[in-house]
Image (cartoon, rainbow, N blue to C red):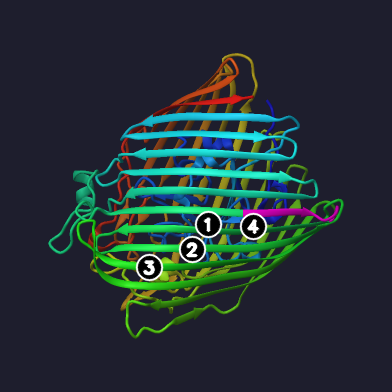
Amino acid sequence: MDSLVPVLVQAFTVQTKWKESAAAVAILSQSDFNSYAPNSFVPSFNKISGVRIEERSPGSYRLSIRGSLLRSPFGVRNTKIYWNEFPLSDATGNTYLNVMDINQLDAAEVVKGPAGSIYGAGTGGVVLLKSLLPFSDTTLHTLKAGVEYGSFGLMKEQISWAQRNKHFSSELKHSYLQSEGYREQSKMRRFNLLYQASIDFVQHRIDFLGWVTDLYYQTPGGINLAQMQANPQLSRQPTTILPGAIQQKAAIYNKTIFAGLKEQWKINKRFNLHAFTTLNNTQFKNPFITNYEFRNETNASLGAKFILHTNNNTLQWISGFEWLFNHSVITDFGNKKGIPDTLQFNDHVNANQWSVYSQLQQLFWNKLHVTAGFSINKQSYQYQRVSDLFSVLQKKTTDLVPAPRISILYDLTNSMAAYSIAAYGFSPASLAEVRPSDGNYYGDLAPEKGWNVEMGIKGYLSNQIIQFDLAYYHFRLNDAIVRRNNAAGAEYFINAGSTLQQGVEFTVKANLLKNQSGFLTNFSIWSSQSFQPYHFISYQQANISYSGNNLTGVPRNIFVTGFDLLILKKLQWYTTLNCVSRIPLTDANDVFADPYQLLQLKLEYPFKIQNCQVRFYAGVDNALNQVYSLGNDINAAGKRYYNTAAERNFFAGIHFTLDK
């Protein structure tokens, strides 16, 4: 039996072995992405303990890391996301993860828990996305193409061209995805075009990343339990007061263009300087039940870090800064059956967020790894309703927020290590919370903040055949931001006292067979467990106290397990079972979503036609045909909590790779 291959992680900007990283870091490789249908982030990220991506309808992602979905009715908040070290999260804390195609990525790292000592605002964690551009001693050209079809009108096509030599590497990728959707009013389409390039000047390396996305997806909206039981494919239904999703043509239109430039300068053997800048624009349209909103968002970022390390890397010191800027023009009209009607509001918002940080890492006695980091952070908003004749400019600025982090890791043996962490995290309100869909401005929303204390043990067993990671964390969050709905279903947010988010995460993977002769060539099994008994510590709503209640939107237990088989050195078989316990849907804990078990299977067969590598694959999602909601609307008006996911569905595709 062969051992697992040790891997390197880039968390906290210091490349180190996974076992020696004093943090709860999970790694997704290309093989993890290949275990599922190549059209969604959901299944591969959800195999990570403590991580949950939901998809209320095709293309509508929301992400939480060790946290709640109290403040995330849609999108990604409270989590910083980077792509090849370029920040994708804007100055308001929002990230459009759904504009990306998972086929654009080669790997991802997920850092769980507050990481403000390096990455700034965010109490949930950090996601580091990677698309690799290797160099080659000889000139190499690679053409890749593929197509996939599936249930409910799923169709995906992709093509890419890469060229590389000793000093230059580049790749051009195109993909197109469309689906009719399982529910009413749930069609989607997404066009992606990406170009990245890297030039190596020995002492300098310059990287460029640019992409364009045109995304459209319909939003069916939530339904109540009786409607889901009668017909799970229903969209939000009209009432005597409000029309439904079909009548209002509820949907999201997102056109985003992004460009980033980065330089890595090796000043000498001990000193490196990395710097980046980005610019992007998003044109956003959202016909909703009660309004028709247009947003024009322009974002810019700038950052640099100075890296000092000794020749043997026993000491590393990193200092730098990051600055993010957002300018948004938000215009709301009435929605008359999918057509903009009378002007309601026209708002201009500017947001700035900056952080300055320093981190020192020292190795003692070749066993004790000590890391201490500290950052100073600040965010400010400027808001004006220019459609009001006598409006005044309103300003909101957070106090300077210090975010320390200290971690200690001790190598128990050559293959196991124990670590402990104390870190302070904070997360100011995002633009969608300061200026939510009800059209009001909530400049008094305070940032979420709190201390996280964590301890864990990780490493390898049985001659590195088994890899494991066990962590316990205790995070008390103050001024938690909670979502509310008005009678029309429009949302707004309030600060709601404090919460206790403590839990246990366990991950294990075992390569039981590898490169064996006979029928069964490879056999590996893996499991991840998330125990999340989160609850409100102090939360008062009018005369009602929710203190002690389970945290809304968070399942207490998530268990994911699977196995991978390689048969006769050719046929690859992937199996995953995702079990989620019941989920509280209201702060009062008087309604719960039922538990569900999601079984996913995929078969892949590679073969070769002359110089062309070919992969054929097919699979099934929700093989047990569960009726479940992959993304509930918590505290929803009219008890419309449920966004039903697809019933049992199938997919198949073929992929070609040609090297010249």
Q: Dot 4: within a 10 Å radius of its alpha carbon, few (fewer than 14), some, or many (20 or more) residues?
A: many
Please give left or right for residue 498 compared with residue 408 in the image: left
Three-letter amino acid code of the residue under disc 1: Gly
Q: What amino acid is at disc 4?
A: Met
Identify residue for label 4. Answer: 455
Q: How far apart are marks 2 and 3 (CA)?
A: 12 Å
**Of tags 4 and 2, which is closer to the observer?**
2
Q: Give the residue type at disc 3.
A: Ile
Which of the two discs, 3 and 1, sits closer to the camera?
A: 3
Q: Distance between the residues labelled 3 and 4?
A: 44 Å
* Label 1 environment density (alpha carbons within 10 Å; few <14, some 14–19, many ≥20): many
Magenta stretch prevailing secondary structure: strand
Asked where in the image residue 569 lies, by quadrant, the reply is: top right
**Earlier residue among tags 3 and 1:** 3
Q: Provide the residue designation for mark 2.
A: 298
Q: Is residue 613 magenta?
A: no
Secondary structure beneath dot 3 equals strand
Question: Which mark, residue 655?
Answer: none
User: Which residue position holds label 3?
Assistant: 330
Q: Name the residue under label 1.
A: 503
Which of these two is toward me, 198 or 497?
A: 198
Label 2, label 1: how far apart the Cα atoms are: 38 Å
Kindly tell me whether residue 338 is visible in this rendering: yes
Q: What stretch is highlighted in magenta?
A: 261-270
Whole-percent x, y for residue 116 in the image = 61, 65
Q: Which residue appears at 32% of the width and 65% of the height? A: 588
In three-dimensional space, the C-alpha distance between marks 3 and 1, rounded to whole angstroms, equals 39 Å
